[in-house]
Amino acid sequence: MSESARRGPSHVFTARVDWDGPGARPTTEVRRFSRAATASAGPEVPALRVSAARTFFGDRDAFNPETLLLSALAQCHLLAFLRLAGLAGYEVTDASVEVEGILELGPGDAGRFVSASLSPSSRVLDAAGVPLGAEALHALHDRAHEQCFIANSLNFALSVKPDTGATASSPTAGE
């Protein structure tokens, strides 16, 4: 069996980021030039205004690479959770995921995320309309974490702390 047959189908995703231009300051003014840009994912998807994080001289009113990464992680977990609940015959009546990530700067200002913690909150009913208990919710969130494409692609520690109060952790996302 070929390697591609063992892996399963692959999908290609594209995005583009266009810098909005120099504005009043040249890039030689490192602390003052514009970090504003526009992210797009094709003509059907509305463009998104992006910048650097405020800490890195960006616009506090725009998404930045760090919040986009964390948003992708939270959205992926949410979508996996909703799918698994539906496949199990459960009705999700409310769901959200908060996520916090720790980015550390190293020598030469090279940085990396070292951890992230997801805090999902949900209300899920079984086929009889009875709310799921903590154990069942925890199991659904564990499976959602295992199936999340983004979590499986990251190389820093992730933990999931669902509204049950229990914690499921992994040393790295891809394990």
Image (cartoon, grey):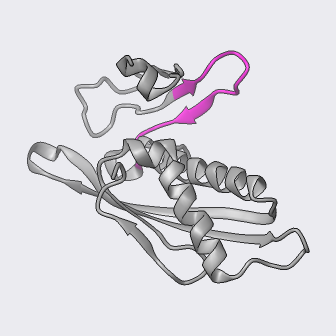
Q: Name the quadrant containing residue 31.
A: top left
> Residue 51: x percent and y percent?
46, 37
Q: Looking at the image, which residue sits at the far right? A: 128
Q: Name the one closer to the observer, 106 or 154.
A: 154
Residue 69 in view of the camera: no
Residue range in magenta is 38-53
Q: Position of residue 145 (x, y in %)?
A: 51, 57
Determine if the magenta segment contains residue 8.
no
Counting from the top left corner in percent of width and height, residue 65 is at 42, 41
Does 52 appear in magenta?
A: yes
**Which of 1/60 is in front?**
1
The relative height of residue 17 versus residue 82 in the rendered view (above or below) is above
47 w.r.t. 148: above or below: above
The kind of secondary structure the magenta stretch mainly shows is loop
Identity of the residue drawn at 39% across and 19% down: 1
Residue lying at 48% horizontally and 49% vertically, measured from the top left: 67
Number of labelled discs? 0
Query: Is 171 displayed left or right of 48 in the figure?
Result: left
Which of these two is toward me, 119 or 37?
Answer: 119
Image side of residue 90 versus residue 13, left or right: right
Where is residue 53 drawn, in percent x and y? 40, 47
Q: Residue at x 75, y 77 (%)?
A: 132
Q: Identify which residue is drawn at 77% across, 54% down.
A: 86
Near-viewer residue (65 or 91): 91
Residue 158 visible in the displayed image? yes
Viewed as shown, does residue 2 lie left or right of 124?
A: left
User: In the image, is residue 84 above or below residue 133?
Assistant: above
Specify the farthest residue to the left: 107
